[in-house]
Amino acid sequence: GAVVSQHPSRVICKSGTSVKIECRSLDFQATTMFWYRQFPKKSLMLMATSNEGSKATYEQGVEKDKFLINHASLTLSTLTVTSAHPEDSSFYICSASRQGLTDTQYFGPGTRLTVL
Amino acid sequence: KQEVTQIPAALSVPEGENLVLNCSFTDSAIYNLQWFRQDPGKGLTSLLLIQSSQREQTSGRLNASLDKSSGRSTLYIAASQPGDSATYLCAPRGGANNLFFGTGTRLTVIP
């Protein structure tokens, strides 16, 4: 149990376009979902925390108008990179937890975004 | 803000060796600590989770220890195998369920 999927696994887009990444908890209901970003050979950095039905909480330095997060149901959260630029190219990973503050985070397989 | 350091950054060992990966963190007020494995271009696989009240956890050939007061954790891998080759990440968790990740130790086990 506790499987998290991401779609797409890879995406290549032109500069200026918007890209949507989906994160789904397949066999459990996720009260809280997290979005991380990872640069090559770097650590994962938390971008934002989203709770179902409410606005996401963004980490300092993360532009909320650039990275739109929607957590519309207990099994789905989406991250939309708006007006993507080459510097947005990165590996984006989501995680989900059942109870938020007290439960383990289960990670998705990640999405590789390349902006040309 | 929590800072996590993992030493060494890279490690190469012959198959069969036992090895220890080190993790240190600056803020000892953690809820728990997880060790993850990440294969190239892939997501994270949780290996072990140690609660703040525990000293160690074991799973198969893996043993993780936690010294919360000194801000240290170690991951011990016994009888290493080529399939253990991956990047290992430690992540202490704060009260807001924030995971703070180190930059990892890239392990290569040579057949």
Image (cartoon, coloured by chain):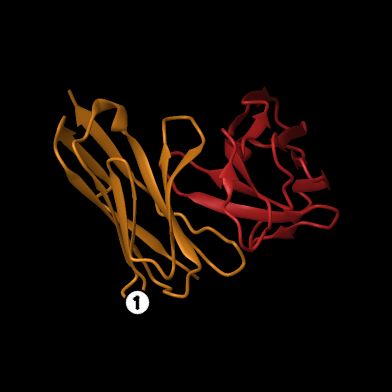
Chain colours: A red, B orange
- Residue type at tag 1: Ser
Tell which of B94 and B49 is nearer to you.
B49
Q: Residue at x 36, y 44 (%)?
A: B88
B37 relative to B93 in the view: left or right = left
Q: Position of residue B73 (x, y in %)?
A: 32, 61
Q: Position of residue B103 (x, y in %)?
A: 39, 50
B57 relative to A34 in the view: left or right = left
Tell which of A100 and A39 is nearer to you.
A100
| In the depicted structure, whether residue A24 falls above or below residue B28 | above
Q: Position of residue B110 (x, y in %)?
A: 18, 27
Q: Is residue B47 visible?
A: yes
B59 relative to A22 in the view: left or right = left
**Residue holding disc 1:** B69
Q: Residue at x 54, y 52 (%)?
A: A45
Q: Please, which chain is the residue tagged with disc 1 on? A: B
**Secondary structure state at the residue bearing disc 1:** loop
Q: Dot 1 surroundings within 10 Å: few (below 14), some, or many (20 or more)?
A: few
Q: Quadrant of residue A20?
A: top right
Q: Residue at x 30, y 45 (%)?
A: B62
Tell which of B10 and A29 is nearer to you.
A29
| In the depicted structure, whether residue B70 falls above or below residue A3 | below
B98 relative to B38 in the view: left or right = right
Q: Quadrant of residue A10?
A: top right
Q: Is residue A63 visible?
A: no
Q: Quadrant of residue B52?
A: bottom left
Q: Quadrant of the C terminus of chain B?
A: top left
